[in-house]
Amino acid sequence: MSKYILKRLGMMVLVVLGISLIVFTIMNLTPGNAAQMILGQSASPEQVAKLEAELGLDQPFFVRYFNFWKGAVQGDFGKSYQTSLPVFEEILTRFPTTLKLATAAMFIATLIGVPVGVISAVRQYSLVDGVSMVTAMLFASIPSFVMGLLLQLEFALNLRVLPATGAASWQSYILPAVTLSTATMATLIRMTRSTMLEAIRQDYVRTARAKGAAERSVVLNHALRNALLPIVTVIGVDFGYLLGGTVVIESVFSLPGLGTLLITAIRMKDTPVVMAAVMFVTIAYSLVNLLVDIIYAFIDPRVKSQYAKG
């Protein structure tokens, strides 16, 4: 298992290097001049050139890329072109908001999606199954920003029970978390239902029933445990995606998260912020995927034996 984890960490380093080069190249090729954006259109060419020299923008491409990694390996990602604040401090200031939102959304989606999917599979073609499938398709079809606006209109403007925007209190995260959870909830309902239907038709489930095992034990201990791998994959992938910053939802609910920081930095060609944010998200996403693989080993002993061989 330890060899597998070390191998994955080594692969993660290569992924981070590759993504950093791609992002740095794209930022270099995009139109616009960061120094010009900072000084404004009224700045003279001499002023722009002076600021470019101060920021190191007059240096060759690979020199700037090397300088970025030279500082990054020492924990220094530079300063923002726009605010002159250390980049890592800005990310650490914004990330807790995104983490709270992602965790709350995933908790809601898992708490509702998995049990509903299990019930739909156990009671296939029943009224509960039909309603859950229609609800799942409805949630999957509605764009997240539309769902967010509808929830704002109903619960913030009409009922006045929850705040519409901001992150002043824990109540401020309820509407955006519910909005984010709907798409993942729909995926989990359908995924859980399909995997459970496949599991409950297996021979070991029929054998457990023939031996007189209680139906609850058959469903939870035998069928669900063997159907968990694809469900855990969906949870891990979606959680990693949410950690990258949900730009649309953060914009709709005016949340100062990582997504809004990244979009603003891209628009202003603030390369240090973009690079550090992308690296942060890449590492977080990779660690979540590694955690999912480790959870596999605890769910299915066959997976653990494969890891041991690797």
Image: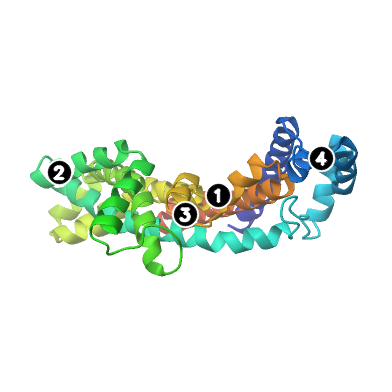
Which of disc 3 and disc 1 is earlier in sequence? 3
Q: In this orientation, does residue 188 appear?
A: no
Q: Are marks 3 and 2 in contact (CB under 8 Å)?
A: no
Side (left or right) of 307 relative to 67:
left
Q: Which residue matches tag 3?
A: 254
Q: Residues within 10 Å of mark 3 (few under 14, many from 20)?
A: some
Name the residue beneath numbered marker 2. 131
Q: CA distance from mark 1 to mark 2?
A: 36 Å
Q: Is residue 183 above or below residue 60?
A: below
Q: Amino acid at mark 3?
A: Ser
**Measuring 87% from the left and 35% from the top, which residue is drawn there?**
45
Q: Amino acid at mark 4?
A: Ala
| Mark sitting earlier along the chain (2/4) | 4
Tag 2: residue type? Val
The answer to whether residue 52 is visible is: yes
Residue type (three-letter) at the residue carrying disc 1 = Thr
Tell me how far mark 4 sits from mark 1, CA to CA: 28 Å
Q: Is residue 292 above or below residue 52?
A: below
For label 4, the crowd category at 10 Å Cα-Cα, with few meaning under 14, some 14 to 19 and many 20 or more, is few
Instruction: Look at mark 4 in the image and give the residue it sits on.
Output: 43
Most extreme residue toward the front, as rendered?
Answer: 42
Residue at the (71%, 45%) spot, across then down: 270
CA–CA distance in space, label 3 to label 4: 32 Å
